[in-house]
């Protein structure tokens, strides 16, 4: 008889604006296998909370839950700070990443865009796709540099910049800055002897199956280059395609130029961050700067892994911050889109995409497809209001209309109800049974 878990425990930690989910597959009293999906924050509730104090508390709580088995796997859905900075081993998150690394995850799963070989190994794929793959990976790195420059500008705001614009630029800029310490720790955890690093894309293997008997893990996103013409066209020389999310204007053109230049510089190993680019960036107005960081943010979100765990007939969906372009490949364009749509109809547990933003839970493609709405659907939302977007432009996160649906039509576990002071590491807990 095939071995399978008896039940699953899910812990949703209070990380303010960020994600941190611990899935424990319980096979027996002494056989539990733990998968940590994301660990990051870009803002905690309460004025006194500090990531350098809070994140180690969560890491230690995770350690307590995983003891003595350690971690079976770590999943980092995408490179945003609010998903990975807890893996950092520097002081900013109190070296919480060291605590996680000591739990010796056997698999470290990330999207293909994080594969370090894509940066240097031309033999990884056929020559053409390898070149465009490298160009996308270098383009993402260049975006991190642009984000840093925007955050720098917001740090010393010019006199014309309003406080609310400064806050938003700072938030988006910092979330998109490369998290060197976390990125390096993820690579180190995956290169440890006995560990496997997996860089996945739609339809590829997750590397988790052999460690989680009886659990099928479907990787629904992100599409890789061969799969998605949309992402292929993200190449910087095609600004109209790359920046199709942007309405237009000077900011858009400068961003396209900057990322093209940065990608070129990085693939030749020239240090990025050119003075000329910074000078021109400083001359943009507020709307243009905002346009730039919003675009960076969306492009990075679309590199999110989308994982669907299929176990004892239950389907658990963890899509990171995937937005519509990433989703639409899975349920519209992929050759197996029909199969994916059928899986999505059966979802029992949904980790609400992108902290409840309007663009990560496509209404028709996803939400209205869930058959178990009004009938046992469990939704997990990790969010913090007042950080991202605004209600004037109907872009507030979490989006009010979506939140209402989640509250009315599913059993919602929302991190906003977790008080920081209640325990050392406040979290929601739920047991999913056959
Ligand atoms: Zn996020």
Image: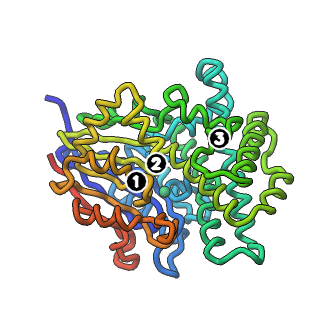
Q: Secondary structure at mark 2?
A: loop
Q: Is residue 394 visible?
A: yes
Callout 2–callout 3 Cβ contact below 8 Å: no
Q: Which numbered marker is on residue 138?
A: none
Q: Which residue is mark 2?
A: 323
Q: Secondary structure at mark 3?
A: helix
Q: Split into 4 quadrants, where in the image is the N terminus?
A: top left
User: Looking at the image, is 13 positioned above or below residue 255?
Assistant: below
Residue 414, position as x, y percentages in the image: 33, 66
Judge by depth and name the residue closer to the eye, 271 or 8: 271
Res 423 → quadrant: bottom left
What's the residue at 33%, 65% (across, down)? 403
Judge by depth and name the residue closer to the eye, 216 or 159: 159
User: Looking at the image, is 157 positioned above or below residue 306?
Assistant: below
Q: Earlier in the sequence, mark 1 or mark 2?
A: 2
Q: Earlier in the sequence, mark 2 or mark 3?
A: 3
Foreground disc of the pair 1, 2: 2
Q: Which residue is mark 1?
A: 353
Callout 1–callout 2 Cβ contact below 8 Å: yes
Q: Secondary structure at mark 1?
A: helix
Q: Which residue is mark 3?
A: 240
Residue 93, position as x, y percentages in the image: 56, 64
Circle 1 residues within 10 Å: few <14, some 14–19, many ≥20: many
Circle 3 residues within 10 Å: few <14, some 14–19, many ≥20: some
Question: Please, which colouring scheme is shown?
Answer: rainbow
In the picture as drawn, the residue positioned furthest to the top comes out as 126
In the picture as drawn, the residue positioned furthest to the front comes out as 248
Q: Is residue 57 visible?
A: no
User: Looking at the image, is 104 positioned above or below residue 44?
Assistant: above
């Amino acid at each position: 008889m095939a071995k399978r878990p008896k039940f699953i425990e899910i812990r949703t930690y209070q990380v303010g604006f960020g994600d941190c989910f611990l899935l424990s597959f319980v096979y027996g009293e002494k056989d539990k296998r733990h998968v940590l999906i994301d660990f990051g924050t870009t803002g905690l509730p309460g004025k006194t909370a500090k990531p350098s104090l809070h994140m180690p508390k969560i890491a230690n709580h995770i350690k307590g839950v995983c003891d003595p088995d350690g971690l079976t796997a770590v999943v980092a859905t995408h490179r945003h700070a609010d998903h990975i900075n807890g893996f950092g081993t520097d002081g900013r998150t109190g070296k919480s990443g060291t605590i996680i690394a000591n739990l010796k995850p056997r698999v470290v799963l990330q999207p293909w865009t994080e594969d370090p070989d894509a940066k240097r190994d031309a033999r990884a794929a056929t020559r053409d796709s390898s070149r465009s793959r490298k160009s996308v990976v270098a383009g993402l790195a260049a975006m991190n540099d642009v984000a840093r420059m925007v955050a720098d500008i917001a740090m010393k705001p010019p006199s014309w910049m309003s406080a609310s614009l400064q806050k938003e630029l700072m938030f988006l800029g910092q979330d998109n800055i490369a998290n060197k310490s976390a990125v390096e720790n993820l690579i180190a955890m995956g290169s440890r002897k006995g560990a496997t690093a997996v860089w996945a894309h739609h339809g590829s293997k997750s590397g988790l199956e052999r460690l989680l008997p009886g659990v099928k893990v479907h990787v629904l996103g992100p599409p890789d280059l061969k799969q998605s013409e949309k992402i292929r066209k993200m190449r910087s020389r095609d600004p109209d395609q790359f920046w199709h999310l942007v309405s237009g204007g000077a900011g858009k053109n400068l961003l396209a130029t900057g990322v093209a230049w940065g990608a070129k510089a990085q693939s030749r190993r020239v240090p990025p961050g050119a003075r000329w680019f910074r000078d021109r960036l400083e001359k943009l107005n507020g709307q243009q700067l905002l346009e730039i960081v919003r675009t960076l943010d969306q492009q990075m979100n679309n590199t999110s892994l989308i994982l669907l765990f299929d176990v004892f007939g239950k389907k658990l969906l963890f899509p990171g911050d995937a937005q519509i372009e990433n989703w639409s490949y899975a349920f519209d364009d992929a050759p197996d889109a029909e199969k994916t749509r059928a899986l999505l109809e059966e979802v029992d547990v949904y980790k609400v995409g992108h902290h409840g933003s309007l663009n990560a839970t496509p209404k028709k493609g996803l939400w209205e497809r869930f058959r178990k709405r009004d009938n046992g659907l469990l939704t997990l939302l990790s969010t913090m209001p007042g950080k991202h977007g605004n209600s004037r432009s109907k872009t507030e996160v979490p989006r009010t209309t979506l939140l209402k649906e989640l509250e009315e039509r599913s059993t919602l576990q929302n991190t906003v109800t977790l008080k920081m002071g209640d325990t050392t590491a406040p979290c929601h807990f739920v047991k999913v049974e056959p």
